[in-house]
Amino acid sequence: MKGRHKQSRDPKGHWLILILVLPVMFAVLFFEGWTTHEVDTATTRSPCTSPAPDAVARGGPVIGINAGGIQTASMPARTVALTYDGGPDPVWTPRLLDLLRQYNARATFFLFGSQAARHPELVRRIRAEGHEIGSNTYTGAVLGEASSARFSAELDLTRTALAGAAGLHPSLLRMPRITTPDTLCGREWRAARQATSRGYVLVTADRASRKPAQGLVRQFSQTSIAYQQTRSLLRNPDVDRFTTVSAGLRLVPYTPATTGERWQGTALIQVTKLGRAFVSAMTWTLAIAGGLGLLRLALLGLFARAHVRRLESSRPGAPWLPEVTEPVTVLVPAYNEEAGIESTLLSLLASTHRQLQIIVIDDGSTDRTADIAESVGDRRVEVVRQANAGKAAALNTGLAHARYDIIVMVDADTVFEPDAVRRLVQPLAHPAVGAVSGNAKVGNRRGLLAKWQHLEYVFGFNLDRRMFEVLECMTTVPGAIGAFRRDALDSVGGVSEDTLAEDTDLTMALWRAGWRVLYEESAVAWTEVPTSLGQLWRQRYRWCYGTIQAMWKHRGAVLARGVAGRFGRRGLTYIALFQVALPLLAPVIDVFALYGVLFLDPWLSAGAWLGFMGSQLVSARYALTLDGERLRTLWSMPLQFFVYRQLMYLVVIQSLVALFLGSRLKWHRMRRSGTAAEQIGGGAPYKSLPTR
């Protein structure tokens, strides 16, 4: 029972964000991958099954097909048309332009539409300096091998990109992997006929045997070799004129793009820029997130090992300190907990720490919770009834009725091991310790969802707590099992009602007040976890929402000195990074992972995923070993990546949206089945407190 039992509507903004952002994100990535990695296209030609028509094979390098049939043409004598395929290239295109300007020469640049969209400024420079622009398709796909949809996309997208970059539609086309006219054979000839039916004039290149003095169309790529060959040709004394293809043959090189087509082209350029920026950002994000994830796993392992080594030596509560035997008051706030309250009370009454005052605070239950608690029939159990006010108010009511200076707070769905209370209070022997977190384990482990939560409790929560103790920044003493000094609670004004995570809020307040908080892993209690996705969602939503509230409330600890400052800079930073920031990036990472499988090396992507999963399994195995748990549950861990993890990051998104919108989270009560005791007497932690 946590928080007030308020009713209000949950914010739906997180769904709107996902509906709008993720599809757009995937569309941008898909387009970037499709164009950059040439998906669904061949980059090599099939062998020719039939030769090019004689009129083409024996004709000139410039080819058109109209009502009069096949027409070819060659450059006039002593005239050379320099043509460059691919690009614009950010390195070599500017150098070639500088070279051509030096010799006052003009050339034709056959551009990839994808590169034109990435470097529109170079397209405009080519045009401004008097050169000609033609189409080399969008990605350099072999048109003869392309599907009908791919064929159209290669030509149409290039037109759109050039319309946005330079406001024109080119009339000249150089088909990729085509050199001389006779290479227009087999499937390439069929593709050439399709292209000319769209109004294009095809430009190939003259054979190597033709001399510049005869007139020449020369084909280059945009590389260092092309630069050297161009400079050599520009010095050839047999050439009077270096010109463009259309100027040499008096062709119409362009048709103007309409205003609407220019807007479409501009949009394409912006999407391309966005895709490149997003891929670049995600590459860095994945590298950083992956590095941080692996670093976290390594630190968890190292600090867990350090925690085990210090348990019997230097930490408060070690054997050289006196045993705590003082009476203990146990507070059990309860709201509609009739299914599990009896098991909770009976487990407490069976405690080896006999001097107990157990106070059940019935917070306006509408079921038989209070009646069942009273029927236990033990003088150590007291029942206090109050109108519904929430868990924090119920705990404060219990504090007002407490007779002893050591307070243990438990949830009404939790079942204690017989020695749990005794073990839990031992670290309080040190006067600097204000609170102790116990080891809450999952009691009802039947079903896949429960097994995932069991792994999360052991591998996530408990391994974190070991690290937090070593770093002196424990962020939460769980409501299921925690011990406190009464004077520590008084020093922070009791349990605050400011947040929905009153346990986290209280723990942070204790640090800021100068108290230390420890973890006693040998104090084991069994709690009941949600058994449906809906219940789990509601529980984690409230936890996350309340944790973020508590972080914001205690943000000043980051700048504090001493114990409070160490907690703030370590604990709050850890939560902000690993429990808020990284889950927010998870949807993006999932989309990018799909991008990697579709467009990058699928084996590399799979290898990275398996490597990270392997490191998770190793860490989880170590955590299970430390907690004395069986390892067979590990088989279910890889499946968490496909359901459970997505649920957890959606919870973070909804919590942040709710906070930004100023929504007040409603009370979510989990339906209890009273199955927390299923594992009672189960796995013992690695370290056991010696018998006194």
Image (tube, rainbow, N blue to C red):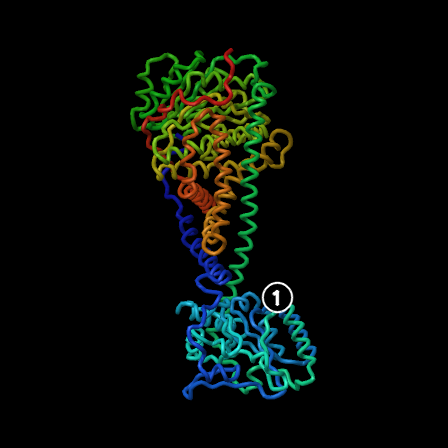
Q: Is residue 569 left or right of residue 644?
A: right
Image quarter in which the N terminus is found: top left
**Depth check, front residue: 423 or 379:** 423
Q: Is residue 474 visible?
A: yes
Q: Secondary structure at mark 1?
A: loop
Q: Residue at x 40, y 28 (%)?
A: 442
Q: Is residue 2 visible?
A: no
Residue 632 vertical position relative to residue 405 in the rendered view, above or below = below
Q: Is residue 126 left or right of residue 629?
A: right
Q: Position of residue 279 (x, y in %)?
A: 53, 55
**Depth check, front residue: 301 or 604:** 604
**Depth check, front residue: 669 or 499:** 669
Residue 593 vertical position relative to residue 513 in the rendered view, above or below = below
Please identify the quarter of the rendering in which residue 557 is found: top right
The tally of labels here is 1
Q: Position of residue 179 (x, y in %)?
A: 53, 75
Amino acid of disc 1:
Pro
Which residue is identified by label 1?
90
Q: Position of residue 209 (x, y in %)?
A: 59, 81
Q: Residues within 10 Å of mark 1 (few under 14, many from 20)?
A: some
Residue 645 vertical position relative to residue 90 in the rendered view, above or below = above
Q: Position of residue 560 (x, y in %)?
A: 63, 34
**Depth check, front residue: 476 or 39:** 39
Residue 308 vertical position relative to residue 101 in the rendered view, above or below = above
